[in-house]
Image (cartoon, coloured by chain):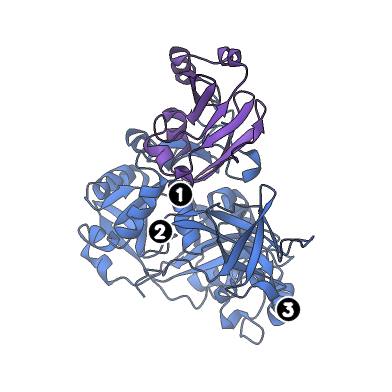
Chain colours: A blue, B purple
Amino acid sequence: MPVRSDKGNSGILNTGKDGPLNEELKHTPLYDLHVELGAKMVPFAGYEMPVQYPAGVMAEHKQTRTKAGLFDVSHMGQVVLRARDPDDAALALETLVPVDVLGLAEGRQRYGYFTNEGGGIEDDLMIANRGDHLFLVVNAACKDADLARMRAALEPQVTVKLIRNRGLLALQGPAAVEVLAEHHPGVRDMRFMDVETLPIAGAECWVSRSGYTGEDGFEISVPEAATADLARALLAHEDVSPVGLGARDSLRLEAGLCLYGHDIDSDTSPVDAGLTWAIQKVRREGGARAGGFPGADRLLAAMAEGPARKRVGLLPDGRAPMREGVQLFASQEADRPIGQVTSGGFGPTIGAPVAMGYVRADLATPGTGLFGDVRGKRLPVTVAKLPFVAPGFKR
Amino acid sequence: MKYTEEHEWLDLDGDVVTVGITAHAAEQLGDVVFVELPDIGTSVTRDDEIVVIESVKAASDILAPIDGEVVEVNEVLVEEPGKVNDDPEGDAWFFKLKIEDASMMDDYMDEAAYKAFIAD
């Protein structure tokens, strides 16, 4: 039963029987725990990571939407930026991202992205103001390039330090707050995108109320030696189950969140991606610190012009998932595609296939009927509003 | 019962062979969310891709194990693809082929050989 190699996410039947991987894979501090929990481990961004546990992707997804899921995201890059004057670190980072970093209050976090000279996106990241330093979380696959970029642009005025001795956990779902509150009641008072340093299970944790699932929840940076203990303590709660990368992907897709390297990449304009909300007024045309990041002229001009294509939600009318790479057409007969799917699969909460992708701007209105080419057949698909599920954030 | 290296099971009754996927394959695939079956009456040649299965993470094909004609398909799987995970080697068969040359069955593994194959 061959896995279709033209469908992007290859490999479920390819794991296990292919012998040792020739690439040297890194382990997170939770590797032994994943194995103990019966996870199916796969290579991901240079790490051996759990794609699912015995419960399976569907159950893990629903668990996160209804109770709480625990994710190991220790493969992501945790970076600290320091300068003698913290404002200097903020201003220096603003030369790489179109975000108002200087205006980010202490104890707050903000989404952003590194831009390039072409006005595309080099990576997306979280930026937190932790008082005397900035704390960044970047994508695992991009962390080496991100570090090189920051070191080249920011040093020596700013020190750029990759934090290698901390794990990163995400506890996500409606029950997350009460589970974590049993370890530190202070988390109840945190708002969406607040960050704090809190002692949890005996370790100094850097906690943010944020995540990548569309649910309320927390991301917890924890000293490496305490990571497994904290994970076990959280999993001991009856409302918490471990969740792998498979459900992480379906959760973020239903939540309308971009996956770097798929929905956004170095050729994607934030204007097309619908991510200009992350460019605060002060960095826009006419703002006090307008521009000043790579590709600013192009990006600000594109904002004024408006997008030629737009990232949209897509709901296939039938049961067949439309996966990454599926070409989209305005009609059954049309010769030329008007867009393509960048992420797609089955949405367990929706109970049907869901996708996102880019379509020509005049065809981006929700409700517009299009066709996706699936294995040579044009199947109907309808443009839909993102996210597919209402976010559960605590504002 | 015979087994293919593509993790299909084949159950021959007279000149009709029923085809499904093994419990091992179902477990490896994960939750199945979509099944596309061939039309009844389709003539197939060995190794034709005649069924598409999509799980939460990937799309796979089931190949025709033997030359023949599709005489029955399990329509229930279209409405309830999750049955493939619940009962892969029972109710969740995919299609039945009327075959001419039953000797082609000899190319495939028996249960002991298949168990050894997946244990490798």
Q: Residues within 10 Å of mark 2 (few under 14, many from 20)?
A: some
Q: Which residue is mark 2?
A: A349
Q: Which residue is mark 1?
A: B79
* Residue type indicated by callout 3: Ala
Q: Residues within 10 Å of mark 1 (few under 14, many from 20)?
A: few
Where is residue A333 drawn, in percent x and y? Answer: 76, 61
Residue B34 is tagged as none
The answer to whether the residues at label 1 and label 3 have Cβ atoms under 8 Å apart is no
Q: Are marks 1 and 3 on the same chain?
A: no
Q: Is residue A271 above or below residue A148?
A: below
Q: Nearer the viewer, residue A234 or A348?
A: A348
Q: Residue A274's image quarter? A: bottom right
Q: Report helix, strand or loop for mark 1.
A: helix
Q: Indicate which disc, 2 or 3, sits on the residue closer to the N terminus.
A: 3
In the image, which is nearer the foreground, mark 2 or mark 3? 2
Figure quadrant of the C terminus of chain A:
bottom left
Number of marks in picture:
3
Q: Nearer the viewer, residue A258 or B13?
A: B13
Where is residue B103 drawn, in percent x and y? Answer: 59, 12
Where is residue B77 drawn, in percent x and y? Answer: 46, 43
Q: Report helix, strand or loop for mark 3.
A: helix
Q: Which residue is mark 3?
A: A301
Tell me what residue is drawn at x 62 percent, y 39 percent.
A4
In the image, which is nearer the foreground, mark 2 or mark 1? 1
Figure quadrant of the N terminus of chain A:
top right
Q: Is residue A163 above or below residue A306?
A: above
